[in-house]
Amino acid sequence: MTKPMRFEILRLDDANGSATDRVIADAETVRELVQDAARTGERLLIRPCPTA
């Protein structure tokens, strides 16, 4: 059975680009967070989590 892909999402500070928050999420949650960020202008860094 294949494990669902997980992603690390970092919220980035507008002033200096440093990470302010970190979330591990599935693809559906990533989609929701990206839509919210697009509405508010929030900057995100999204990358796949390594599989264990």
Image: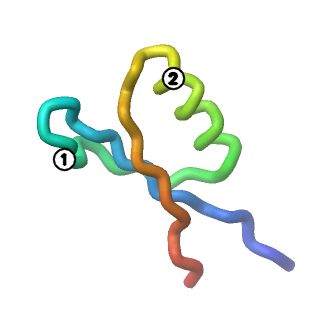
Residue ID for mark 1: 18
Picture colour scheme: rainbow
The spot of residue 2 in percent (x, y) is 81, 75
Tell me which residue sits at (54%, 65%) in the image.
48
Quadrant, the C terminus? bottom right
Q: Residue 38 has which mark?
A: 2
Q: Amino acid at mark 2?
A: Ala
Q: Is residue 15 left or right of residue 45?
A: left
Tell me which residue sits at (36%, 48%) in the image.
10
Q: Amino acid at mark 1?
A: Ser
Q: Nearer the viewer, residue 2 or 38?
A: 38
Considering only vertical position in the picture, is 50 above or below 12?
A: below
Q: Nearer the viewer, residue 52 or 34?
A: 34
Considering only vertical position in the picture, is 51 above or below 31?
A: below
The spot of residue 20 in percent (x, y) is 22, 42
Q: Nearer the viewer, residue 46 or 21?
A: 46
Q: Residue 46 has which mark?
A: none
